Image: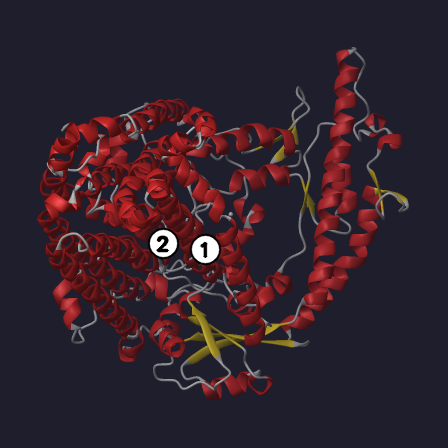
Amino acid sequence: MATKIILERTPVDLAPRAAATSQAASNSASGFLSTLIPVALLACVYLGIFLVLRTKQQRIYQPRTYLGALSEHQRTPKTKSSKFGWISEFMHIRDEYVLNHHSIDAYFYLRFFRTIVFICAVGWPLTWAVLMPVYGTSHGTGQQFDKISFSNINTNVDAARLFAPAAVAWVFLGFTMFVIGRESIHFVQVRQAFLSLPGIASRISSRTVLFTNVPKEYLTLDKIRETLPNVKHIWIAMDTKDLEDDLEDRQKTALKLEGAEVGLSRDANKRRMKAEKKGQGKGPADGLSWLDQKKRPTHRLKFLIGKKVDTIDWCRSHLAEMIPKVDKQQAEHIQGHGTRNSAVFVEFRSVQAAESAFHQTHVKLPKQFRSRTVGTRPQEIIWKSLNLSESQRKIRNIVAIAIIVWMIIFFGPITAFIGAVSNINNLIKIAPFLSFIILFKLAGAATLAEVQLKTQTWYFVFQVIQVFLVTTLASGASAAVGSIIKSPGRAPTLLANSLPKASNFYINYLVLFGVSASAATVCNIVAVLLYTVLGKLLDKTPRKMYNRYIKIAAMGWGSIYPKFTLLGVIALSYSCIAPLILAFATIGLFLLYTAFRYQIIYATDTTPVNTQGRSYPKALNQLMTGVYLSELCLIGLFAIATASKTIATGPLVMTIVLLVCTVIFQVVLGRTIKSLEKNLSHDDEAGLDIEKVSETAKDGNGATQAHLPGPAVNNKPTNFLVKLLRPPPLPSFDAYLSTPIPGYSVEDRDLAYMDPAITMPTPLIWIARDSMGISNREKAETGKIIACSDEGAYFDDKTGKVMTGFSNVNEDKEGIDWATLAPIHERDRLY
């Protein structure tokens, strides 16, 4: 009789009992708390360290406010020295400041965070208001976080409720596409306005296009001018392999000599200090009495078996041979003698002409020509790749992709294991020996920008497949594995019900990133240790100390975008089946935005690689992955539900139509973007004649300000999608409009796009001054062969350590000749 009663009960009647049985098995809320509490405590420690060290270690936390290697235009205003007074100043700095004073890449990186935070912030109240009541009051067996997810819908009883996530998907995912399309169009408009700014358009790099795979018959100045219109200057890449070998030899020898000279003075200085402690008198002015000839620096010409020589004498002799040899080769290359590579840099008279040639809008290039990049600065060129043929590039690219695919496959089991651990409670029931885990819950590109953009593409693929899809499937499968073993035929249904539960792992993932990673980013404790501890241990010469001091941590767009694009993809993918995730995504991404905003404004260098903001539209396009995954997941869940209730066909059809609309939207958007990108190359008549403008500036220093127009405004009829999406207004470019137009000397222009091996000057030997007169003696002897200086560096008479004008200080001291010590920085700014 009891058996009969139980069999006659509906799933609704059994739900409370099933819930009570499964409640102990759910670890979603407890897992969240076990992640949040230690992460929050760690974040508090990070923030505490940051607040204490922010003013004491300005070189780490606010180098952009004072560092002499940065131009005045690039520096950020200094903040209050109090622990919290700086916060209001930081909050009042607009993101447009980054655009005007740092780089367009940095501006769009911050805008990317703002965009995904905005999307999640809008979706948060929408999904909570509609879906949480629908899921929470359903008759499923979900407990804790699982009760307010799609998995709590019992399709046998609540199939009509499936219309709710289908309708929300139309509204929220449609809104997401609207924002992505709006931002994509906004990017093109901002980039075009940016490139037309006088201060940007006047740079040689803005008007220079790199062509590769150029046939030999075209490798002459006359032939290139016949082929391309509006050409101002041409640089044909040269084969510099032999020169590079000799250049490397010269450089290594110079640095070896420099280290030996400093070591010689250091050893003598230590001997003097010991003598003075014993009360012995000072030696003669030339310091010879403090030198121990038996301890002079020596080395072997070959490892272990080579002849042992005096390092200083040998280096001087070798440099006397290598310097004129390198100088002769460089002069020959400058005169155009030698083998020419199949790559050509062409400077055009306007940005519009350069864009036209790059897109081949008005120019029909020979079939072999390939316009690879426009607007790339000389220091971003990968010179060794310029002579590669297209077939060589394709082969290298195939090999690189094959390695990446292998890595994705190889790391699959490892990532699957991590996903399984996220639902370890379910696995422990089947394999109790796993209970111990509960204790503790890583091609031929011609430019650095091309490398970053390719890295962004493939790293994102790796992230989506390994960190997201494999983990999601493994997590969902582990949650259902026990039931699947008992009822293999119900595997699709069981997986469909269990996959939404995988969101619990990503809620913890977002908490970990949002709270801990954001605090760790501003704390930057690794940089503190590298600069203060490792620097003191390893930096024994003025040059090494200078290099560590001058180099600000840089942003690698190809590696940092995918990690955070993935967070947006995760939030979108689970938005309609586990709406709780949008709250954590909004908060976590906002914290990350704030952390990176501080780093960009005060602490990092965003200029070494210039993608002209192109990482932003790529990231927006990648964000569409989350839209597709969300739609496909819903389609799969609805399709399974139709097996038990035909009413589920309605939401299934709704979501399939949405998927089709999404594909159409992305195709139309892609064509619209390509059309807009070519608009700049169409406006040849509106192009700024840089040749005339540059003549108004003084040669070499750009100190004469020309009165020039602001960004060009495109008045051409716009695509209907542009009108529909209504992109936001352009940001302010005030700082750029007030920036002087750079003037180029004849030498600057002639050498701009020559291989650095051709233009690299003979290095300066930089030693430290001592009170014994040894440095003066070494300068005189070494100076007969190679320039030698002890400017800005000296041995401390009390500690015997090398000191410089920037040793352990938070601001530049007077007396540092930046023009002498850092000429390369000036050249970087010039182009």
Name which residue lies at 26% across and 76% down.
686
Q: Position of residue 787 (x, y in %)?
A: 70, 49
Q: Which element type, helix, strand or loop, lies under badge 1?
A: loop
Measured in 3D between alpha carbons, the distance from the residue under mark 2 to the one under mark 1, in whole angstroms, is 9 Å
Residue position for label 1: 609
Quarter occupied by the N terminus = top left
Q: How is the image coloured?
A: secondary structure
Name above or below for residue 761 compared with residue 484.
below
Q: Amino acid at mark 2?
A: Asp
> In the depicted view, which residue is nearer to us: 729 or 614?
614
Taking the image as shown, residue 758 lies to the left or right of residue 155, namely right
Q: Residue lying furthest top in this view?
A: 279
Name which residue lies at 55% across and 43% down.
817
For residue 664, which quarter of the picture? bottom left
Q: Are marks 2 and 1 in contact (CB under 8 Å)?
A: yes
> In the depicted view, which residue is nearer to us: 687 or 209?
209
Taking the image as shown, residue 673 lies to the left or right of residue 321, namely left
Taking the image as shown, residue 747 lies to the left or right of residue 614, namely right
Q: Position of residue 98 (x, y in %)?
A: 32, 48
Name which residue lies at 75% across and 23% down.
270
Residue position for label 2: 105
> In the depicted view, which residue is nearer to us: 313 or 341?
341
Name which residue lies at 30% across and 51% down.
492
- The answer to whether one can see residue 123 in this image is yes
Q: Which element type, helix, strand or loop, lies under badge 2?
A: helix
- The answer to whether one can see residue 726 in this image is no
